[in-house]
Image (tube, rainbow, N blue to C red):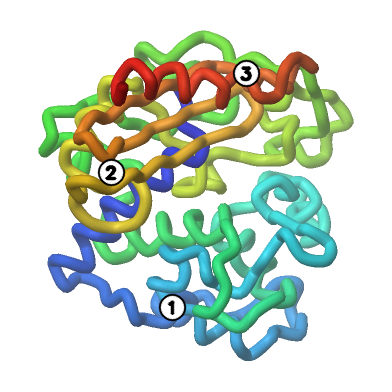
Amino acid sequence: MRLASVSKAWVDAGIFQLISAHKVSASAKVFSYLGITKPLPAGSKVDPRVYKITIQNMIDHKSGWDDSVGAQYDPTFHMREIALGLGLTQEVNQTQYVQAQLAQPLQEAPGTTYAYCNFCYTVLGMVIAKASGMTFANYIAKKVAAPMGLHNVLQSHTIGKPLKNEIKEYYSAYTGLSAVYVTSSQQWPYPYSGDDMSLEVAGGASALATNAQSMLTFMKHYIIWGTGKPQPGADWAREGSMPGTNAWSEQLPNGTNYAVIVNTRQYDYGSDPNAFTDLQPQIEKLLNP
């Protein structure tokens, strides 16, 4: 099943590998490193602090973009509008998507304020691709997952045929205009681009799929939040939530790890919005009495 934002844990593992191997520096200015420095639309004004954002700022969710402030704009769920705003008749690509975000105002100085950032992890996925010479998805599959004996950590497709062994449906009651078919007026289910997101563009922010058993294996080798190896006695957790997916992975202080993935979100059907999170203390009572 899709991992939603638990995908970010795999991004952190990939970045950790590449930094440790000196293939990329955490202090590198991320947009200069990627060679993406010209905003779209052409001629847009850019806050000069944007070009000071480092790879480490992105890892730490301290880019300076804060969608909890002001207009509360998260480009991850505005891909159709971005494409149409650029005059495109097809899905925006990753480079165009990043160029459009360059023109968005910063709410804080880079490196100063924590603000959870989906966009940051799309960019970090692109850093993995450049530093490794592979696609983001291939690097995670071949260099992060495969050495752990895992061969089922793959990038889910927004629409079309599911991956091998992927569930056949992600459930949501909602529909919207497509981020893939940007000139179409047809309504699409939220998990299949109707939520204004394309997994292929979002990449490291939310696009990976695997199962709970693979998440348990992952947590034996890497910390679930941030970059590094597991830390005995620490309590680290990460949630993924998007239409059609809710995922949770946690490393408990007693050394026990657990993972849960389901193919819906409770409030996508108007039921108890806390049903998924209410399950966690019940699990932890069993695992950590």
Question: Sequence-wise, which precedes: disc 3 or disc 1?
Answer: 1
Amino acid type, callout 3: Ala
- Disc assigned to residue 54: 1
Amino acid type, callout 1: Thr
Expressed as whole percent of the image width and height from the top left, the position of residue 38 reads: 61, 80
Expressed as whole percent of the image width and height from the top left, the position of residue 106 reads: 69, 77
Q: Which numbered mark, 2 or 1, is in the foreground of this view?
A: 1
**Seen in the image, is 112 located left or right of residue 176?**
left
**Seen in the image, is 47 located left or right of residue 185?**
left
**Residue displayed at 36% across by 81% down:** 28
**Seen in the image, is 242 located left or right of residue 281?**
right
- Disc assigned to residue 275: 3
Q: Residue furthest front?
A: 289
Q: Quadrant of residue 282?
A: top left
- The residue pinned by badge 2 equals 140
Question: Sequence-wise, which precedes: disc 3 or disc 2?
Answer: 2
Q: Where, quadrant-wise, is the C terminus in this rendering? A: top left
**Seen in the image, is 144 located left or right of residue 58?**
left
Q: State the SS at label 3.
A: helix
Question: What is the C-alpha distance between the residues marked 3 and 2?
Answer: 31 Å
